[in-house]
Structure formats: structure tokens, C-alpha cells
Amino acid sequence: MAAFFIRRIFQMIIVVLVSAIASYALLNLAPGGPLAGLRQQQQNARFQINEDDIARIRAYFELDLYLPYRFTRWLIGVPRGPIVIGGQEYFSDLTIGCRKPTETETLNQKTGEYESRITGCKEYVQLKDLEGRRTSRGILLGDFGLSWRILRDRPVADLLLSRLPKTLQLIGLSTLLSLLIGIPLGVYSAVRQYSRFDYIFTTLAFMGSAMPTFFFGILMIIIFSIVPKEAGLPYVPAGLSESVRDYTVPLIGAVEAGSFKDRFLHILLPAAVLTIVNISLYSRFVRASMLEVMRQDYVRTARAKGLTERVVILKHALRNALIPFITIVVFTLPGLFSGAIITESIFAWPGMGRLYLLALGDYDYPVAMSIFFILAVLTVIATLLRDFLYTLADPRIRLS
Amino acid sequence: MSVAQVANLSAEAISIEERSPFQIVMMRFKRHRLAMVSLVLMIFIFSITVFAPLIAPFQVQELSVNKYFVAWGTVDEATGRVHHMGTDHIGRDYFSRLIYAGRISLTVALISVIISETIGIVIGAVSGFFGGWIDSVLMRFVEFMLTIPTLPLLLIISAMLLRDENLIPIPESILKFMGNLLLLTPRDARSAVLIILILAGFGWLNAAQLMRGMVLSLREQTFVEASRSLGASNFRIITRDMIPNAMAPIIVDASLGLAGYIVGEAALAFLGFGIQDPIPTWGNMLAASQQFMLDRPWLPLVPGLPIFICALAFNYIGDGLRDALDPRLKL
């Protein structure tokens, strides 16, 4: 058991590291980046930007360092300067980047356009130049660095913490509701297999799981928000997590902006979309699992013992049918953090998923990387937790 | 009973049993009513998109100046053509764009499925057949990829690829071919090719796991042993014995995969990380029309509905195929 966990934790570290390297490289090798708008400004005569300005801006985004050094500075906060052993500085002349790259314009024969390429370096950055430069302590030590664009120069952690409660509310509520509704529906559907209820419900669940959330969300907004509002009927407000101004809804009455009633009305639609989609997934899963279990010998034995049907289903069948469900419940953990990207963006819900999308579109890579990194860590923790819980729930499974 | 009668009887008996495996599968498939309806529907939708240039009254990017949001069925006075579903926010015919968008969305999904299933079959078969360290390396990689949350990673990759079109060199001939298929210029076809690569790059994992499982169980069967004792090479055993016998779950996976890719492509486009606006797809039409839904709720409904219908139909077809191809089910 101990050996198993040590090996698994070792594997987890490798997985997190590999995904961190991969995503860091992907984002930082991507064209565009925070300097995208600079070149256009350079053409403008009023804002002449000279070479030194560009070098300064590149240093601000750490773009003047070579990628491996940038990565280790982001991950664990080193190198910060020359290595000092016994008062003696070592490696202070080591070249770790390029402050002013030379660009050459070449004519592309195929397209006939001039392309500028980095062909050399006029001025290098050395290890000793890093002294005095601001550094994060490294993401592994809990310092997520500073935001580039969304909240310029403010810690990414502040940004994440301001969004997290909203995501927890939305995902927590919808997951809880869909478990509470989905499991009984699945069980009932399995117990009454091929009944009219089972037939109708299976069809609905099938449709629900095929329904793309982005279309479903828009459909819900039209049906419950736009159309009733036009018709003067009670409607549900859509968009954002609370209103900016006070408003009145027919039948419900006046709603004060930011009050509990207001926030409740705003969470209704996004939570409903996520809940309905999850219910159809969960209940189909429970139904299949229950049907499998009810064919087992021990269920027949329980019936033969003369136990009531209720005890047979709830105690003998359901408990075993829920074992595969551990996977689903455990993997809501990363979801609680990362939110639902699509649903949040349709309802303009100020949560984590929307922040991630914003960070990617706005080149705020420290924010995007932090979210992706935390997500990767939570995912591997969830995987470990799942394996552990399986052994608790099912003694036949051994960890090895 | 005369000899002739006996001969007649046995002939009859044989004619009943003489059904090809394909006919048996078709018979079983026809019993799944919803799957049949879905199949007919999909053939209908596919043929509309194939004949898009004949059906669509307008060109994809043809603007009718000063005719934004015209009503359904408005006639264009200059040419006498009809805007069946009106026009969008910059005066392009909505119906024509919907059809061309379908052609692009469905083709992207179809090619992604073909590529990803092929990769999955090859990697799964190699992994299962050779075992050992090849197997562990490949399967660890698959498990690793399955652990990573897909949508955030897809977004990172498409953000990267779509911002610099020349990051991955794509042969001119492929771009020309795709351009002809999708009725786009080779330059515009590049983004479609990139989306296919992204979708297929993540889509083969499931197929590889399925194929590996099938190959592992087939490896122990006697007909494979017979093949080997007759001196067949590894390549021959894999391509002639293993892959044809493992096709059933792969076909089901492909059908469900089609549904997934249609939704996946639309989701990427919807979030702004897919094929971009002048080129129509159902996803980016939905995204573009979302801001006008307060006044014109039908604008997002028109491109959204086919995404839902296609996803549902391919799910039903997959369900029907699963029942039809399952050899444990007797007729």
C-alpha cells in the first residue's frame, strides 16, 4: 500500500511537470503574445518607440530570456542571479538571453511580402543582469506571479480568488442538484426497465447528453428570459451573476440589485443548463450500472432470503451500482475549480472558465498558465483519490 | 419424398442461411427505428450540403448592401432571387450560408473521424500486438493525454495555431484539395485543415484503447495461431486477421465520434478559437448571431438546431450500430 502510493505520487509529479512544460512551451512559442500591438505603434510617427523602449518592454515580460530559463523562473523562481558560494560569484557571465535581437527583412518569394526574421543578437543578457529584477517565487511554491493585462501588475492569485467563489457557487450547486436528481431517476428507470417511464426518460436523457451546452444555453435564454419579458410575463434575468440596476419582474415584484433574490434569479439559468446536462449523463450511467448489478447472483440471493424489494434495491444493488460512480464524483473536483468554460461564457458568468478564456484571448499568459497548472494538479490528485476510494468501496480491488 | 423434392428442400434451407454478414447487420440495424430515421435524415442533410452550389441562391460571402436583417422570403429585386431565411447583420443570405456552413462543419467532422480512427487503429494494433515496452510507452501516453482536461488544452493549441498560419507547414496540394472540397480558396482552407488536425490529434485516444483491447483478446484465438503456423508475417496477421475482426467497436466509436466532432468544432468556433467568420460554420454563425438574439431570437436558433440534430442523429446511429454489430445478439 505504502509502496503503491509512493510510486503513484512519483508518477503524479512527472505528469504535472510534463503538462506544465508542454503548456508553457505551447503558450510561449505561440506568435502574437503581449508584444502583438507594438509593431503597429512603431509605425505611428507620434509614438516613436525606439530600440531601448522595446528592450525594456521585452524585459518586463521576460521575453529577453531564453525559454528554459523563463520556464524555471516561472516554476521555481530560479535563476535570480549568479550563484554565490562562499562569497564567490560563479557563472555570472553565462548568457541566458538576448536583449536586442537583430531583425532582417527578407523577401518571401512565394507571397511577395517582406517578412522580418530574428537572425542574430546585438546585446546579450547575462546571469549577473538578473540581479535586482523582480521575480516570482515560483508557481510550485505558491506564487502565481503578476497578471500582464487583465489586472496589470496585480498578483494572479488575487484575480483567481476573486473569481473562485462564483465558480464554486455555480458548479457546486449544479453538481449537487444533478447528483440528487440524477441518481434516483437512474435507479427508478433501471428498476422499471422497459416501462413507459423508462422509455420516455431514456429518450430525454439521450437528447440531453447530445445537446451541445452552447445551444442549450441560448435556447434557455430565449425561452425563459427574452420571450416572457417581451410578453410581460415573469422572466428570469440572464447574464452576469447579479444585476447592476434594480428591476421589477412581474409576479415576483421589485428586485434590488445585489440582493439574495437578485443573485438567486441570476444563477437559475446557468445552473439549470449544467444540471440538466449532468442529470442526463449521470442517470444514464446509474441506469446501466444498476441493470448490470441487478443481474448478479448476490441480488438474487438477497431476494431469495425474503428481503423486501426496497432493501434489495437500496442496500444490495444500489450500493454496488454506485461504485463506478466514484470516478464521476471525484472528477468534479477539478471542475469545481476550472468552472464550465462554455456555460460561463454564454451567461457572462464571472467565473474561472470565463477568466481562462479571457486570459487566452488577451495574451495574459501568467493567468492562463496558473489556471491550467492548478487544473492539472487537481486532475492528478483526483485520479489518485479515485484509485484510493475504489479500494475502500470494493475489497476485491487491490492496489498494486 | 422424391430425390427432386429433397434437393429442393435443401436448396431452400441454404437460401435462407445464405446471408452475408453485411445483410445480417443491415437487418438488425433496420429494427432500431430511431437509428433508421437518423440515418435517412443524415443522408438527406449530407446530400443538401453536397449540392450546396445548386441549392443555395446566393454566394457565401455575397453582401446585399443596405439589406441587413431582411425578413424571411424577401425577394432580391435586382436578380429575383429569394432570401429564404432573410439576411444576417451585414446583409449576407442566411439560408445560403447555413448550407455552406453545413458542408464545412460536416466535412471537417468526417475527415477528423477518418484520420483519428486510422491513427487509433494503427497505434492500438501495434501496442496490443507487440506488447512489452512499446505497449507500456504508448498506453502511458494515452492515459496521460486522457488525464489532461481537453477543452482548456484544445483552446491553448488552437489559439497558438490560428494566430500564426504558417506555424505548421501544410502541403499546397492538401490545401487545394480541401479548398475544392469546401468551395474555399486554398488560403481559407488552411484554418479548416488546422481544426481537423487539432480535433483528430485528440480524438484517436479512445479508438486506440478499444483496438488494443480487441487485439489482446484476438491474439489468443486459434485462427491467429493458424495464420502464424502457415507462415504469415506480423504485418499480414495484423492487417488481415486482427483489424477486420476488431472493426465492430471501431465503427460504433466512429459514429459516436462524428457527433463529438460536430459539437467540438462548433464549440471551438463558438468560443472564437475555431474557423473564423467570413468562412461560415454552424458554430461561428451561432456565435455571431448570439448578440442579436434579444431582437431576433431565430438568428441563433437556425444554425444551432442542425448542430443538435446531427449530434443526436449520430448518437442514435451509433446506438443502432452497436446493437446490430454485437455478435452475442442472436437474430
Image (spheres, coloured by chain):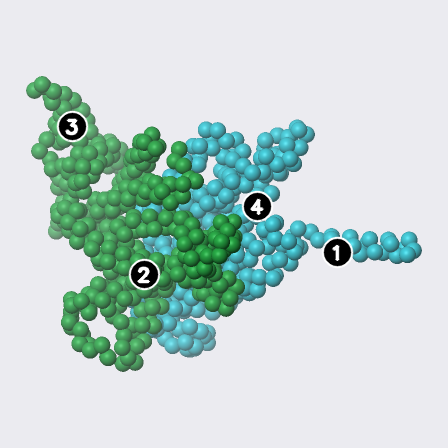
Chain colours: A green, B cyan
- Counting from the top left corner in percent of width and height, residue A378 is at 28, 44
Q: Secondary structure at mark 1?
A: helix
Along the viewing direction, whichever of A365 and B322 lies nearer the viewer: B322
Position of A19 with respect to B141 (left or right) is left
Residue at the spot 16% in from the left edge and 40% down from the top edge: A143
Instruction: Looking at this view, name the residue that lies furthest to the bottom.
Output: A232
| Badge 1 vs badge 3, beta-carbon distance below 8 Å | no
- Measured Cα–Cα span from mark 4 to mark 2: 39 Å
Q: CA separation, marks 4 and 1?
A: 26 Å
Q: What residue is disc 4 on?
A: B247
Measured as percent of width and height from the top left, residue B259 is found at: 46, 56
For label 1, the residue is B16
Classify residue A219 by image quadrant: bottom left
Q: Does label 3 or label 2 sit earlier along the sequence?
A: 3
Closer to the chain start, of discs 4 and 1, is 1
Relative image position of residue A189 (x, y in whole percent): 46, 62
Q: Residues within 10 Å of mark 2 (few under 14, many from 20)?
A: some
- Which mark, by number, is residue A177? 2
Q: Nearer the viewer, mark 4 or mark 3?
A: 4
Q: Alpha-carbon distance for marks 4 and 3?
A: 58 Å
Question: Share a chain, discs 4 and 3?
Answer: no
Q: Is residue A172 visible?
A: yes
- Label 3: element kind: strand
**Distance from label 1 to label 3 (Cα)?**
84 Å
Secondary structure, mark 2, is helix
Q: Are the numbered discs 4 and 1 placed on the same chain, yes or no?
A: yes
Q: Nearer the viewer, residue B251 or B307?
A: B251
Which residue has dot 3 on it?
A126
* Residue furthest to the right: B2
Label 2 vs label 1: CA separation? 54 Å
The residue at 36%/42% (across/down) is: A392
| Label 4: chain letter | B
